[in-house]
Image (cartoon, helix red, strand yellow):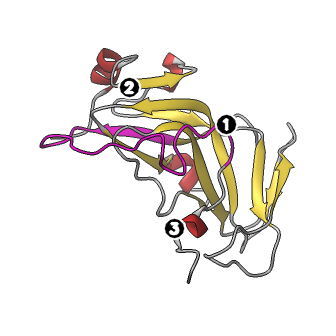
Amino acid sequence: MGILTSREILNRLNKDVIIQPFNIKNLNPNSYNLTLHDELKFYDCDFLDMKTENSTKIIKIPNDGLWLEPGETYLGRTIEYTVTKNLVPIIKTRSSIARLHIHIINSAGFGDIGYSGHWTIPISVIKKTKVYPFVTICQIYYNDITGEIDKEYNVNNKYQNSRDIMASKMYKEFDSNI
């Protein structure tokens, strides 16, 4: 059990690991850099309620950048569409990005076996910070698993096969009678 090396990522490419588009320049010793798309989504309401679909707005990140405000969480997505089989994918902030006090996926970077889609990336900043579209903002790495796989993330899961920035769908987990 362990993290796949770059050589092993390449060995499993288009089998257990699918990354589209794939760019060899984004391959690291034991991870792959993922790219930020040119749109962000944010909640445009003052309060968030777990039991409701909260209102959001989309903003385009211009080529000359967009200033992100402290105290706000933005949702971005990766350019890359990934599929992971027989491994556990995990997304982390690139260290160069973290050193600018940009927080990516503080607690939402753990993927399930069988997940496929564009990754939604929660982004927050400590200081007012300018971000740009199409930068490699986070990295995905793959962990081997131990034991038989008896359950995978499948088409019935609320975020599977996502093609867009996905705001929380927590409200779907509540019984309508509550």
Instruction: From the image, tell me which residue sits under label 1.
Output: 135
Which residue corresponds to the image point at 50% horizontal and 63% vertical from the top-left?
A: 106
Could you say which is closer to the camera, residue 95 or residue 24? 24
Q: Which residue occupies the extreme front position in the image?
A: 177
Residue numbers of the magenta segment: 139-165
Residue drawn at x 61%, y 76% as measured from the top left = 50
Q: Is residue 154 magenta?
A: yes
Q: Earlier in the sequence, mark 3 or mark 1?
A: 1
Q: Main secondary structure of the magenta part?
A: loop
Quarter of the image for the C terminus: give it. bottom right
Q: Residue 129, can we see it?
A: no
Identify the element where label 1 is drawn.
Answer: loop
Q: In the image, what residue type sits under mark 1?
A: Val
What residue sits 42% from the left and 41% below the top? 154
Judge the density around disc 2: few (<14), some (14-19), many (≥20) Cα neighbours within 10 Å: many
Please indicate whether residue 101 sits to the left or right of residue 115 in the image.
right
The image shows residue 150, relative to residue 101, as above or below, that is above
> Pointer 3: what residue?
173
Marks 3/1: CA distance? 34 Å
Q: Where residue 54 sits: x, y (%)?
A: 73, 69
Q: Quadrant of residue 23?
A: top right
N-terminal label among 1 and 2: 2
First of labels 2, 3 by sequence position: 2
